[in-house]
């Protein structure tokens, strides 16, 4: 077994491609703090920066066998974080525009019967899609979005780890984004 701390990045990536979890752990430990600082300076949100880094490394692990770098590992990681930050900021801008548009609509007083019918239909669609989630994932989602529990509270309530809670929320939101499309930014964010 090699001393992973003495291996260079290229050697670690080669081992990672073969499924070596210790090489993955070494890469994570080597870069997580620097990447977190990089993300936090741009996002100014600790939890969002932590989530971004967690999702980046989860993605790297999931795609490990196909990981071929065209540059150095640090360059790849920083570019990945930068791109994810750009995506988050673009999503925030889009959500902000949707919310502003919605607030303007509500402020204009267009509360007619047609609006209420569409609202009920949308609520029904959303609830139906939430009900179609796997039971544990649905419970995690409902505790988070309907009862406003924190990850820690959900983990304690369901006797699972906070990482499992986070994973369930990530997958649930991904499923709902696909099913509900552009309505998601108005509903949950």
Image (cartoon, rainbow, N blue to C red):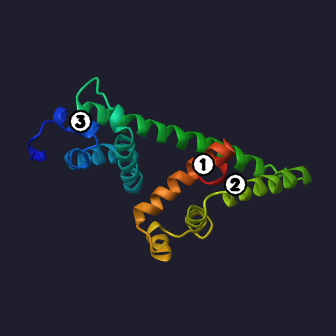
Residue 122 pos. (x, y %): 77, 52
* Secondary structure of the residue carrying numbered label 2: helix
Q: CA distance from mark 1 to mark 3?
A: 31 Å
- Residue 62 vs 144, above or below: the answer is above
Q: Residues within 10 Å of mark 2 (few under 14, many from 20)?
A: some
CB-based contact (under 8 Å), mark 1 and mark 2: yes
Q: Residues within 10 Å of mark 3 (few under 14, many from 20)?
A: many
For label 3, the residue is 13
Identity of the residue drawn at 78% across and 57% down: 124
Q: Is residue 61 left or right of residue 8?
A: right
Q: CA distance from mark 2 to mark 3?
A: 39 Å
Tag nearer the camera, 2 or 3: 3
Q: Looking at this view, name the residue that lies furthest to the top.
A: 70
* Secondary structure of the residue carrying numbered label 3: helix
Q: Nearer the viewer, residue 188 or 107?
A: 188
Q: Is residue 13 left or right of residue 87?
A: left
Examine the rendering and report whether any part of residue 100 can be seen: no
The disc placed on residue 46 is: none
Give the mark, 1 or 3, whose residue is nearer the N terminus: 3
The disc placed on residue 175 is: 1
Residue 188 pos. (x, y %): 61, 54
* Secondary structure of the residue carrying numbered label 1: helix
Identity of the residue drawn at 56% across and 61% down: 137
For label 2, the residue is 129
Q: Answer with the quarter of the image where residue 80 lies.
A: top left
Give the mark, 1 or 2, whose residue is nearer the N terminus: 2
């Amino acid at each position: 077994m090699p001393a992973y701390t003495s291996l260079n990045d290229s050697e670690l990536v080669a081992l990672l491609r073969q499924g070596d979890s210790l090489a993955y752990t070494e890469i994570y430990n080597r870069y997580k703090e620097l990447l977190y600082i990089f993300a936090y300076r741009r996002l100014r949100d600790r939890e969002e920066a932590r989530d971004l880094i967690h999702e980046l490394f989860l993605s790297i692990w999931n795609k490990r066998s196909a990981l071929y770098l065209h540059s150095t590992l640090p360059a790849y990681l920083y570019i990945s974080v930068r791109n994810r930050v750009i995506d988050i900021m673009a999503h925030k801008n889009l959500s902000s525009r949707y919310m502003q548009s919605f607030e303007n609509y509500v402020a204009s007083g267009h509360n007619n019967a047609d609006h209420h019918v569409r609202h009920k239909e949308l609520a029904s669609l959303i609830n139906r899609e939430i009900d179609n989630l796997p039971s544990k994932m649905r419970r995690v989602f409902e505790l988070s979005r309907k009862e406003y529990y924190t990850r820690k509270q959900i983990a304690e309530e369901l006797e699972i780890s906070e990482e499992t809670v986070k994973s369930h929320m990530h997958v649930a939101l991904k499923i709902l984004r696909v099913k509900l499309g552009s309505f998601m930014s108005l509903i949950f964010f």
